[in-house]
Amino acid sequence: MARKPADQSVNREDIIVAAADVLYRNGYEATTMKDIAAEVNLTAASLYHHFRNKDTLLLAVLEGGLEVVIEQIEPVANSNKTNVEKLTEMIRLHIYYVTQNTAVGAAMVFEIRPLLNFRVPPRNGNQFGGSDYDEFLDRRDRFFKRRAYFEELFVRVIEDGVKKGEFRQVDPKIFTKTMVGANNWVAVWYKEGGRLSGDQVARMIAENFVWSLQPYRSASLP
Amino acid sequence: MARKPADQSVNREDIIVAAADVLYRNGYEATTMKDIAAEVNLTAASLYHHFRNKDTLLLAVLEGGLEVVIEQIEPVANSNKTNVEKLTEMIRLHIYYVTQNTAVGAAMVFEIRPLLNFRVPPRNGNQFGGSDYDEFLDRRDRFFKRRAYFEELFVRVIEDGVKKGEFRQVDPKIFTKTMVGANNWVAVWYKEGGRLSGDQVARMIAENFVWSLQPYRSASLP
DNA sequence: TTTATAATCAAACTCAGATTAGATTATTTT
DNA sequence: AAAATAATCTAATCTGAGTTTGATTATAAA
């Protein structure tokens, strides 16, 4: 019954990568299904065989990026390193991912809103009415929860660090918001082949944020 | 000849404010001229009496916001305070503005790209062909230069601070990018009436960034 | 009060982009 | 090979949004 997809045919993953790329260049609203399709040598209509509609495709892009980052950061957060080590590593990983995947990274920065203001009401007689619509909303909510979880990972490390005196007294939530904002923003200005490598940028910023949390320090870096 | 505009009629400024507001809620592409017009009780067509087109209107919104912030930060940058004082004050002003004008602030974060990828080619037979098009491009470039200048104000203070030993050795450009990113990002998450006031948030983040630049410090804050 | 022009509107134009319908081709399973 | 379904395409539909046109109203200057 079920058939394995042909090897040379385009699959979901290919389309997601292509979409991220076009999204990066043009932004959601300015990106046409045709643009995305062209990137994988298909027609716009063919995309609808893989994704229900444009919004669902965008969501898939964002979900993918977020999961990868969480996958990398989570084990560090749950390790038994010191909070200083944890935080340094987590920031570094986050930023490095962003520099290596500016397309997805920028999408995560810029394309949240089309998701928030999901306009399309369930039109009767439209394929997208009823349960499909609900399904989308559910998936979107799940995405936002994952996003909150991602931030929560940072908050916990900072809270714990503050409690144990590794970090000075800051507001962990505000600090995290600020930091995550700065880190995501890297996708906007980082250009490959510039003065600094992604790794260097990641290390510099990580060091800086962690440094800013130290309650006491001597004149030279550790 | 020239006629003074009527007092109760809608003016450019009103429209800009309304546009910022709608933009904040919906994003550029999802914002229709009709939406903006409705906000000031006009029809979409009427907007074209005040602005040549949608892109020009967006540009006006961004220009306005940027100029206000520069106006506030520039005198501080040029004052004869210490670099520590300057930077603290500059960040504080920037963030405070953002919290008080989330609409414009978020627009500055999210709506740069529509400007970058200015699609509309000069269509012949269109009112927007020829010199009007060039005029727009010029104005857009001027905006980006102002934007660069805004960042430059921060870079200078940091460079000077590093040179004079007030700050530790950081890369001033990377530091500024990171910081400005974080500050702009405040527009995305700050909600009026939340746990902290705009002023509190501004102070906390300012203190933190400046703190992170100190080459040496004792256990307690100044 | 006349006149010029600013401000506004209603209606029409244009066009692009998302989506659908239906047919066609490709590939795997039986 | 036959059947089933996956992958794709062409062509058409449908809608919404930016913009234009031309008229109408309001207001300030003469």
Image (cartoon, coloured by chain):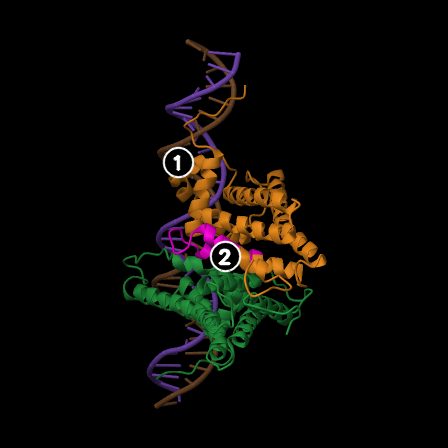
Chain colours: A green, B orange, C brown, D purple
Residue B200 part of the magenta-drawn span: yes
Q: Which mark is residue B42?
A: 1
Q: Which residue is mark 2?
A: B204
User: Does B61 sit left or right of A2 as displayed?
Assistant: right
Tell me which amino acid carries mark 2: Met
Q: Residue at coordinates 37% horizontally, 57% vertically from top-left? A: A118
Q: Which residues are magenta?
A: B180-203
Asked if the residues shown at circle 1 and circle 2 are in contact, with their CB atoms under 8 angstroms apart, the answer is no
Q: Nearer the viewer, mark 1 or mark 2?
A: 2
Please state which of residues A165 and B4 is positioned toward the viewer in this rendering: A165
Above or below for C3 versus A160: above
Q: Which mark is residue B88?
A: none
Above or below for B182 versus A101: above
Chain ID for label 1?
B
Tell me, yes or no, whether dots 1 and 2 are on the same chain.
Answer: yes
Please state which of residues B120 and A8 is positioned toward the viewer in this rendering: B120
Instruction: Assign the C terminus of chain A to one quadrant of the image.
Output: bottom right
Q: Main secondary structure of the magenta part?
A: helix
Q: Residue at coordinates 47% horizontally, 73% vertically from top-left? A: A157
Spot occupied by residue D4 in the image (x, y as percentages of width and height) = 33, 81
Tell me which amino acid carries mark 1: Leu
Above or below for B78 versus A182: above
